[in-house]
Image: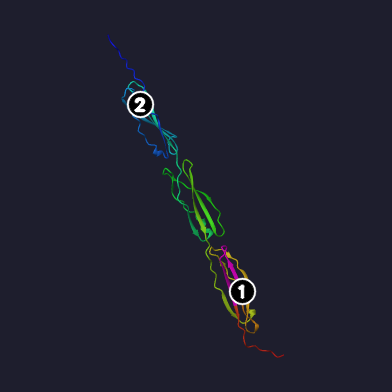
Amino acid sequence: MSFVYTVERNPFTVPANGSATVACPNLATQPVPPVVLSNCGEVITPTGPVVVNNPNPLTCEGTRIYTWTYTDCEGNSATWSFTYTVERQPFGVPANGGSTVDCPDDTDVQPTPPVVLSNCGEVLTPVLFNVTPKNGCEGHRNYVFRYTDCEGNIADWTYIYLMEYLDFAIPPSETMNVECPLNASQPVPPVVYDNCGKLLTPIGPVITSQLGDGGCEGIRTYAWTYADCEGNTHTWSKTFNFLYTADFTFTRM
């Protein structure tokens, strides 16, 4: 009498597929496949991995799938895969920059934006996104640079000019001695520019007189006031001192 065993391998099982979300493609590194046993307990050596990138090449966001195939001696097979989802994270920019300048025209100099990296280390190219209008006097002027990574995350960096007018200078006031009021004609005030080179229009003249001995006009002053857009003011004047001659003659008719 004989007894015949028929050995028929049953399928084996593999663990559930794995997955993870990472911020950068270079973090989607090859995982270690799990240890899988045949239905009879032998360790099965997997083949692979087969790597599939979507999109291919995977340079920004997408998925990367590593797949191994396990096959037992009978030919039963099963696959195990690990899927990475690449999801870019926002990046940071340095604190805004700025400087104080004397004149509006100084703000025409475009500042140099800083070097900014994406969250994955790529150098991002800034684009000059906005420039606010140039003020005629004091105030702010902003240059806004925008950085965008491959996923569309954006961050802005701003350079702020503060315009602070400096005071201007005028020639020294003048004094002149003359003999008679007739010689004290109205002078021409000097040409004066503000600290940024703008021609200032003087206001005046304001004419003041001071009587001398005997009730005659002794001093006459012509004064003009210059003011810049910030409100800095200076007065220029010319003063005439009347020095009457003591000697005079009568002509007898």
Element under disc 1: strand
Query: Quarter of the image holding residue 175?
Result: bottom right
Q: Tell me residue 135's x, y (percent).
A: 56, 57
Residue 143 placement (x, y as % from top left): 51, 52
Magenta stretch bounds: 222-239
Query: Which numbered disc, 1 or 2, marks the residue closer to the eye?
Result: 2
Label drawn at residue 70: 2
Residue 188 visible in the displayed image: no
Residue drawn at point x = 63 percent, y = 75 percent: 208
Q: Which amino acid does label 2 sit on?
A: Tyr
Q: Which residue is at a point 35% across and 26% down the rendered structure image?
A: 70
Please, is residue 166 above or below residue 79 in the view?
Answer: below
Do the CB atoms of the residues marked 1 and 2 lie less than 8 Å apart? no
- Marks 1 and 2, how far apart in space? 106 Å
Q: Is mark 2 on a helix, strand or loop?
A: strand
Which SS type dominates the magenta stretch?
strand
The one of 65 and 8 positioned closer to us in this rendering: 8
Q: Report whether 250 appears left or right of 121.
A: right
User: Which residue, as the protein is rendered here, is positioned at the far bottom?
Assistant: 252
Q: Mark 1 points at which residue?
A: 222
| 220 to the left or right of 112 | right
Task: Find out whether residue 226 is within the magenta segment.
Answer: yes
